[in-house]
Structure formats: structure tokens, C-alpha cells
Amino acid sequence: MIRFDPSSPVNLLADRFWEAILEQSPTTATMYGDERYDDRLEDPSALGRARARELAETTLRAALAIEAHDQPLEDRITLDMVRVVCELQIEQDDQRIDLLRPVDQMGGPQTLLPTVATFQAADTPERLERFLARLHAYPAYLAANIELLQEGITTGLTAPRIVTERTIAQLERLLKTSAQDSVVVRMAKVGSEADRARVLAVVQDEVIPADAAFLEALRGAYLAASRRDPGLWSAPNGDALYRTQIRAWTTLALEPADLHRIGLEELEQIEAERKVIARAQGFDDDTVAYRAHLAADPANTPQSAEELLGRAREDIERALALAPGYFGTLPRGGCEVRAVEEYKEKDSPFAYYFPPTTDGSRPGIYYANTYDLSSRSYSKLASTTYHEAVPGHHFQIAMEMENERLSTFRRLGSRLVGGAYVEGWGLYSERLADEMGLFRNEAERFGMLDAMAWRAARLVVDTGLHALRWPRQRSIDFLRGAGLSETDAVIETDRYICWPGQALTYKVGQREIERLRAELEARDGSSFDVRAFHDAVLGHGSLSLATLARELPTWVAAPA
């Protein structure tokens, strides 16, 4: 086994780059358990943007000066990942995509402190002072974001109106909550109630007024200037912006029209599979009727939030028990199940995963959304759990972070351009769960196929919204036709509007992993080792899809 050499020129460059990224993105460092920058927030001002630009340019020059062909395998991959991160950051900076980031119901500035409070330790005097310093920095942070709103109005690069409206509604919900009951105060990981009182004072005197000022800026001229059409095409230089976002999320130069066509073709294939199940369950070919039957079945609907969370925990344990038959290497870290926080559950997807800390002090966290419980079903929960937790994101991300053969940048930072790999693995894991026999019944298998259809539909609606000029309602209707509930179709559509290109990562990545597996199965025949294949796919951390396709066949040796 080739050992990791931290002193190689490539790894030294990657380490310097990652260290600078953490310093410029201090809350990212906090999420990974790095406490060095716990007293500060990101700088979205012109000065902060200039510093990020300089880092990308100087790092790219250094990367291009190293001859890739002379490097060992992992160093070649590292060099490639550094280059891709820097090139995409520079291109997006040229396009001023940062002007859209302050208005985001999924991860905008208003979500930052509630998220950080959930994870940042403030249980010693030193940690408490850092946490308080971070709270004190919040008004300046939001003031810089307000400046971006004003610049967006001037340039015409504003968020779609529905995104602005959702962000406003989220802030209104936050501000309706008293300071004492706010997420920041309640979730602050302090050592005493006296310390919590200090947090409360800062929230009341500084954080809430800053949120109110941000809300006022959004409600005023910005809302009036927000784009009426939801797609990125309607922004200045919108077609070019969308193509860049496709590359940023998938690392591939893909044509919107091709992605749209692939989505439609996949939907047709998936519907044929769903009809087989509906027919076997006595509904002929009527998949809509069978889905309605599942939605009305009390046994398919959790009766409480804790019941839903308990089922997710049980599914994770079942998957872990069977995993050794499909993986040679398993993650050391555990996976905890939590409910999505109340303040953002109305805007959040059905579920998502949060990585563990690098020191093992916090496990990976699978968040399940318990909002509108009557719309949540066990037939949907199963495939979602296998995607987000085991053997999906938790396996991929936890093993990446635990991989001692990779540099810190490769274990943590390469996800900056590995979105299609990460989400592709998650979606691949849903089909793998079927192969592992994890679905309890045909209802759960039907739910898995609905989930597949949903991701195929994402190719259609993301390109439809952002390139083909679809109105918002057409996306909602299309997703409902693909099997989503009204609640999920609305939330998901607005998520795609907010994050152009992100929805493409799932199917694009899954198709590439499945294509590579099929090629190796054809090459190796009965000697194909699925455990070796999975270990190879997960054994090098997050990758660009082009790198995965180029290198994977050499990692899975052909039988002698």
C-alpha cells in the first residue's frame, strides 16, 4: 500500500490551500470540529471576495507549475482537484454569483447562527468567549450581505421572487420567536445557565436587530427588484451562469438539452418498473392508484415524529448488519438520527446528512424532516435513509474523512467539486439497498422507484426551469406526476430554483457509477467482486466524475 507523504510538493500545496480556505470560511472549520476560528464569521464584503480571488489565482498558478505526470496516483488526483476548485471559483467570481447567495431559504445568512449554535462548543470560558465574539460579529456580517443585495439591485443580478419570498418568510418566523426561545439561545452548548444568559443578552441586543435589518432590506427594494421568472436564464448573462453552475455541481460540461432528454428517457424506464409492482398488487398498470393506496394506508404513515425517527434508526441498523457482504471497509464513526429543527423544517427537504467531525467527537447526523407528518410515509423513508445514511452518504463521507492515505484537503475540501460523486453515490446506494434485500416489502420498493423517478425528474425540471424557461407551476405539476406529494413538489421546486444545477448531481453521478460497474462486470464476468468495486469507488475520497471514470478501472484489478 502506498503511504501518504505529507511532504510532497502537491500535498504541501493542497494543505496550504485548505488551511487558507478554513481561515476564510471559519464556520466550515467549526462544522469539522476545528475550533481555531470559532470567534469569527465569513467575510462576504468586497475585501473578503478579493482575498478569496487571490487565493484561487495564486494556488492555481502553483498547481499548474507542477508536472502532473511525474506524480504518484493520489498526488495526481489531488493536483487535479485543486485545479478544478480554483478554476471554478475564479469563473464564478467573474460572473458575480456571490450576489445571489445572500437570498437563499436553504442556506442563506439567516440560517448560519442557528446552525452553528447546534455544533459549536461554548462549554469553557475560552470557548464561550469565542462563541460570543462570533455573535458580536453577526451585525457586520449581515450588513455586508445587505450591501450585496444593493449591488444585486444595481446590476440586475437578483434572486427569483419566490426565493426572496421564502427567505423573508423564514426570517419572519425567526423574528416571531422570542430571544429566550430562539434556536441560538436554546441550542447554545454552554457550561451553565449564567453563560446562557450572556448569550441571550447578545442575541437580544445584536443578533435580532441585525436579522430585522436584513429582513427590512429584503422586504423593500430587493423584493420589488427580484426576478419574476424563476429560472437562471432570466438573469443577466443567465445562460452562461447556468452552464457554469452545471460544471460547478457535476464537474462535466453537459448540455441542458441532453440532460433534459436523459431525464425523460429514465422516467419512462422507471415507470415500466413501477407498473410491474402495481400490477402484482392488484392495481393493473395504474401506478397513480397504487400510490394513492399507499398514501391512504395508515400502516404506511408514522403516527408521531419519534416513530418516524425510530424507523430510520432501525433501517440503519439493518443496513449495517448486511454491509460486510458488500463492503470490505466500513466506517468507524457512527450515524445519529435527528429531526430537522422546527425553525427551518417548512423549507427543508425530506432528509439530509451532516458529516461527522474529523476528531470523532461528533458522529455523522441523518436529519429526517417530521413536518407535515401525514405526508411522510415509510415507503418513502426507507430509500431516503439508505441514500442519506447507510450505505449512502454516511459510508462515503465518513470513510473519506477517516482515510489516512489522503491529505486533509482530499478528505474534506475535495467535496467542493465532488457534488455529483457524493450525490451519485447516494442514489446508487438506493438501488444497492434493493440488491442487498433491505426493502421490507413491495411498497418500499415502489417508494425506491418513486425516488428514482424523482431524481430523473430533477434532470427535466432543473433544465426546464433554468434553460428551457419553464414557469414554476409546471415544475410542481411535473414533480407531482413523477410521484411526489404536493408538499414535497413545492419545496423541491423552490430548492431547485434557489440552487441551479444542484439537482443534476444525483442522476448524473449515479449513471456514471453504474456505467463503470457494468463495464467491470462485463470485463470480469463471474469473477467480479462487488466488495472490491465498492471499496475502490469509496477509497479515494470525493472525486470529479472525469477523474473517477479515468482511474477506477485501474483500481479494480482484472482477475488473473
Image (cartoon, helix red, strand yellow):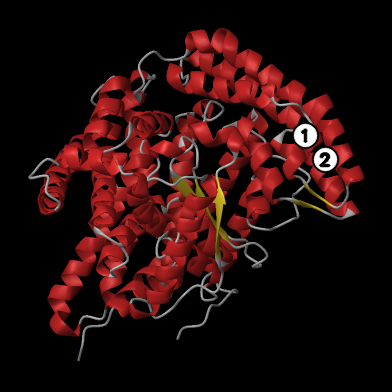
What residue is rendered at 65% in x and 36% in y?
48
What residue is rendered at 41% in x and 65% in y?
77
Where residue 231 appears, as percent x and y from the top left, is: 34, 23
Q: Specify whether residue 485 is in view.
A: yes
Where residue 45 appears, as percent x and y from the top left, is: 65, 29
What residue is rendered at 25% in x and 46% in y?
450
Instruction: Please give the residue where the numbered disc 1 appears in the rendered image.
Output: 137
Where residue 463 appears, as percent x and y from the top left, is: 26, 33
Badge 1: few (under 14), some or many (20 or more) residues near its Cα, within 10 Å? some
**In the displayed structure, does residue 39 sit left or right of residue 505?**
right
Q: Specify whether residue 67 is in view.
A: no
Instruction: Please give the residue where the numbered disc 2 appears in the rendered image.
Output: 133
Q: Secondary structure at mark 2?
A: helix
Figure quadrant of the N terminus = bottom left
Figure quadrant of the C terminus = bottom left
Residue at the farthest left position: 284
